[in-house]
Amino acid sequence: VIIPTEISNVFTDYYSSLYNFKDQTGTSPPKTEAILQYLRKLPILSLTAEHIASLSAPITEEEVKECIRGLPKGKAPGPYG
């Protein structure tokens, strides 16, 4: 395929079939309302007002210093830390 409109059509067809739930499984996509009802029934924990305030507070200079002091000597942080 070398004509731009044909290239566009190939892309469109490919990604339409790739992300079309019905084409892949033969069933309709789940209903949004049914999913929301299920999620509303789950016992989801929430933060207390105290925790929210603590997490929303600005980071202090002392907290940064404490964190830096806790780092191992002679080591550099890697991709996971």
Image (cartoon, helix red, strand yellow):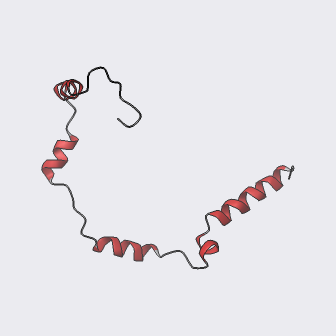
Q: Residue 66 location, x and y as percent?
A: 18, 27
The quarter of the picture where residue 45 lies is bottom left
At a point 24% along the width and 25% down the height, the residue shown is 68
As drawn, 9 above or below 51: below
Residue furthest to the front in view is 74
As drawn, 46 above or below 33: above
Q: Residue 48 location, x and y as percent?
A: 15, 54
At a point 72% along the width and 59% down the height, the residue shown is 12
The quarter of the picture where residue 6 lies is bottom right
Relative side of 22 to 74, left or right: right
Q: Residue 14 location, x and y as percent?
A: 71, 61
Residue furthest to the bottom in view is 27
Relative side of 45 to 38, left or right: left
Residue furthest to the top in view is 74
Relative side of 41 to 24, left or right: left
Q: Nearer the viewer, residue 67 or 29?
A: 67
As drawn, 9 above or below 21: above
Residue furthest to the right in view is 2
At a point 56% along the width and 78% down the height, the residue shown is 28
Relative side of 12 to 70, left or right: right
Q: How many labels does the image show?
A: 0
Q: Residue 18 location, x and y as percent?
A: 64, 63
The quarter of the picture where residue 43 lies is bottom left
Q: Nearer the viewer, residue 66 or 51?
A: 66
At a point 22% along the width and 32% down the height, the residue shown is 59
User: What quarter of the picture does the C terminus occupy?
Assistant: top left
